[in-house]
Image (cartoon, grey):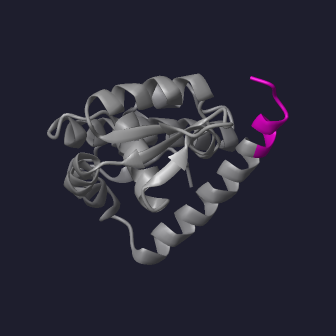
Amino acid sequence: MDIMENTVPIKESENTADAAKKDEFFSQFIMDDVFAAWLLLDFTRFSVARLRNYDLALINITPEQAAILQILARRHGKATINEISRRWMRRTHSVSTLAHRMEKQGLIKLTKYPHQKTLELSLTEKGQEYYRKINRHEIEKVFSVLTSEQIRSLSKSLHLLLAQARSMLNEIDF
């Protein structure tokens, strides 16, 4: 089975294999199964992220801000810049810059404790309100084509890939 066969919108009169053959863009990249799978993952992530950006634009926040709000909500409303940086795999100064912007918007509060080098972020009422407004409808609509078992299998595979990539990135000083 060609790993790229489901990348093309299929007309009712076409079968999946015929549609994939017509997609010259993808066919030029198919070198091996690993690269084809990576390419498919990358294009899928990009497409779903665009849908996510649309949903978030409706409430006037960025995907990065939504990620910070989600991390804080999962951590009972508080986390340090270093914790978020490690969890999100972003440089500390990038998280710090974003946190300062979010504080100006009233979404979070920054606290520096004496004798500590890092800042703690905490959700404000406004931040909690925005977190509750985050719409997951488009993402759920995309995933609705999968069964529960397929979603669990996909999640398991993605966790393995993420763990491997993080392990490899830990070996690189970036």
x and y, in percent, of residue 168 in the image: 80, 39
Which one is in front, 10 or 95? 95
153 vs 114: above or below: below
Task: Tell me the residue at 80%/25% (across/down).
Answer: 173
Which one is in front, 160 or 31? 160
Say left or right for 165 vs 63: right
x and y, in percent, of residue 29 in the image: 57, 27
Say left or right for 11 vs 153: left
Q: Residue furthest bottom?
A: 149
The stretch of residues the image draws in magenta is: 167-174
Total residue callouts: 0
Q: What quarter of the picture does the N terminus occupy?
A: bottom right
Task: Tell me the residue at 35%/43% (across/down).
Answer: 66
Q: What quarter of the picture does the C terminus occupy?
A: top right
Say left or right for 124 vs 120: left
x and y, in percent, of residue 31 in the image: 66, 32
Q: Residue furthest front?
A: 114
Whether the magenta-drawn stretch holds residue 133 is answered as: no
Task: Tell me the residue at 48%/53% (across/down).
Answer: 78
x and y, in percent, of residue 70 in the image: 40, 52
Whether the magenta-drawn stretch holds residue 171 is answered as: yes
44 vs 132: above or below: above
Q: Quadrant of residue 45?
A: top left
Task: Tell me the residue at 33%/53% (across/down).
Answer: 15
Which one is in front, 101 or 22? 101
